[in-house]
Image: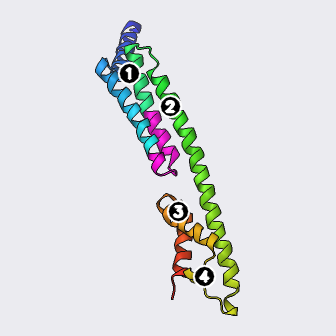
Amino acid sequence: MKTKATLIIGAAVVAMYSCDTKNYTEEDRIQVTERLESFVDSVESAVQVVPVHNWSTIEERYDSLDARAEKVYNDLKVEDDNLERIEERYETVLKNAKAESENFERTAEMHMNNIESWWEKTAEDVEKGTQNTAEDIEAATRESLDWLEKNFDKLGDESKKKYEEISRELNKD
């Protein structure tokens, strides 16, 4: 009886193990490597165009592709430095992109603060006859508005909202 139970358990373990593993081919290894490298290429390109991204989603996707690649490499018992090289490149791209994103956000915040400061100052002078129009904007504030307009698609949601509110107010007749 004990032998039967052991055989059944052994068969179940073998069945579960065989469902979880696959015999991968060299083509599978090339494919997962190319997918991982393409993903890193796309992240690198994307951060050059728009510096602000959902980093957790990007990292989850990378981790998923990396885990799949490692599974294929381990199954084939391949030992080369492709995955390590791609991971190092990804980490560098991510580090640089996050730094660029933080810098962009600081710059956007500086320009937004500049405009808000001007807005508060001129809003107080409305009673004295000053009009809050686009023509009245000081040079530094104009530069900030131009920068924000140029980079509008790259701004965070809160900055976009503030910029739109101020623009609406400035364009009132």
Of helix, strand and loop, which one carries label 2?
helix
Give the residue drawn at x 29%, y 21%: 27
Q: Are marks 3 and 2 in contact (CB under 8 Å)?
A: no
Q: Which residue is mark 1?
A: 72
N-term mark: 2 or 4: 2
Q: Give the crowd class for mark 4: few <14, some 14-19, many >=20 residues within 10 Å.
A: few
Query: What number of labels is visible?
Result: 4
N-term mark: 3 or 4: 4
**Magenta extent:** 46-64
* Real-space CA distance between mark 3 and mark 4, rounded to the nearest whole angstrom: 27 Å
Circle 4: residue type? Asp
Give the residue drawn at x 46%, y 40%: 44
N-term mark: 3 or 1: 1
Circle 2: residue type? Arg
Circle 3: residue type? Asp
Mark closer to the observer (2, 4): 4
Q: Which mark is residue 89?
A: 2
Mark closer to the observer (1, 4): 4
Q: Where is residue 5 shown, x and y percent of the image?
A: 39, 12
Q: Where is residue 43 shown, x and y percent of the image?
A: 45, 41
Res 15 seen here? yes
Of helix, strand and loop, which one carries label 4?
helix
Q: Which residue is mark 4?
A: 136
From this view, report whether residue 137 is shown above or below residue 86. Answer: below
Find out whether residue 143 is within the magenta segment.
no
Taking the image as shown, residue 114 lies to the left or right of residue 54, namely: right
